[in-house]
Amino acid sequence: MRASLSLGQCQTIAALRQFLLFDVRLKLSLCDAAFYLSGMSNLIQTYDALAQSGEITRDPAQEACLPGLEDIRAHLDSAPKRKRGILGGLFHSKPEDVPQGLYLWGGVGRGKSMLMDLFVDSLENTAARRVHFHAFMQEVHEGMTEARKRGVDDPLAPVAAKIAADVKLFAFDEMQISDITDAMIVGRLFEKLFEAGVVVVTTSNRHPDELYKHGLNRQLFLPFIALLKDQMVVHELVSPNDYRQDRLSGEQVFFSPANADARQAIDALWKDLTGGKTEPLVLTVKGREVVLPDYRNGAARARFHDLCGAMLGPGDYLAVANAVKLLVLEDIPRLSRSNFNEAKRFVTLIDALYEAKVRLIASAAALPEMLYVEGEGSFEFERTASRLREMQDKDWGQDSE
């Protein structure tokens, strides 16, 4: 039986949905739209219908992206092979210089992921896949490992070939490069995908020129940036609206004690935010795997032991903070001499989340200032407790990009 929600919890859910760029709020309604609006002739009409129904807030900056996405949709669903610039109309592509996709970038909270979901759901006759970029790169690494075991000279070739055989459209959400191994692979991979005729649509918070900025051996990454700009239309979603900022209005996001009531409240929030459909997100950091057990559209859920009981370090927590917009962290215990190492990792994790302006929902054995009251490190923990309090504020992350 579904747990009943209080008025405050309903308000919390509404604000969190806004915080997650409409992505999780729209996941269920967009699935409905794909069915009920399947008779609509194009993506622009579908967006207009959703706006009129109140499912989304009409935004001229988002609407400016629709003609380009609609050109891709119409081309893929109706033409067996590319004849003209598939991004005509808004972007005025030249027939002799056909782009193979769209790179949609802009600040967080503008609705990029929502537009991608709407676009992918609108495809009727096209083999397509939508995946978070981190999860995709993990699959690539696994595929290359298997190819090496078979003695393949170029382990990337069969990975790219399988992708091209399976899909005509690949949609990547939240492209960002922070690992040198990924940086060295992704250029060759995209080149092979483009050569095979795969159309790519991706979202990112950064312009291509800003990808992997200050990264190790970045000069070796520059040809990939040139490839993106040559093969894809780069379009910035410039909107004055940051839908993340219609956020929590003082409702509870830190639950103590971490008992059955806290679990029930978080379960209700999580189900309404994600629809209950999640998958693990596996991040690769210097050859190690960091696993977030439940992930959906920028929201991740894990237990204290998952992230602080494992042998993880600052680099791992930075990767987590860069990969999510909201983290639900459950079952934080009291901290003391007996779990000193876990306490140190928790401090490092909170620092990473704080600096990256990641929203935090948590359940703990005690309130922040009572979590670590004795033992080595307890004095220093006062700073962490203060940050935990600050991160509960309704305006947390107001100035983040």
Image (cartoon, grey):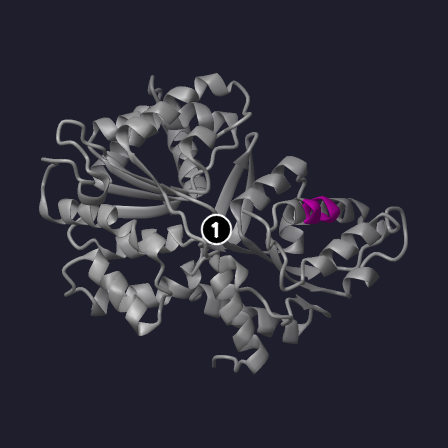
Q: Is residue 194 above or below residue 77?
A: above
- Residue 392 within the magenta-colored segment of the rendering: no
Q: Is residue 31 above or below residue 126?
A: below
Q: Is residue 309 visible?
A: no
Determine which residue is flagged by label 1.
280
Rendering coords of residue 201 (x, y %): 30, 42
x 55%, y 21%: residue: 216
Foreground residue among 38 and 310: 38
x 42%, y 39%: residue: 175
x 59%, y 74%: residue: 264
Give the quarter of the image for residue 385. Answer: bottom right
Side of 93 where 323 appears, left or right? right
Rendering coords of residue 336 (x, y %): 84, 53
Side of 22 where 79 appears, left or right? left
The residues colored magenta run 346-351
Q: Amino acid at mark 1?
A: Pro
Q: Secondary structure under badge 1?
A: strand
Magenta stretch, main secondary structure, is helix
Q: Is residue 151 above or below residue 75?
A: above
- Mark 1: give few (<14), some (14-19) or many (20+) Cα within 10 Å: some
Give the quarter of the image for residue 84. Answer: top left
Foreground residue among 150 and 379: 379
Q: Is residue 314 visible?
A: yes
Q: Is residue 45 above or below residue 132?
A: below
x 55%, y 30%: residue: 287
Foreground residue among 93 and 278: 93
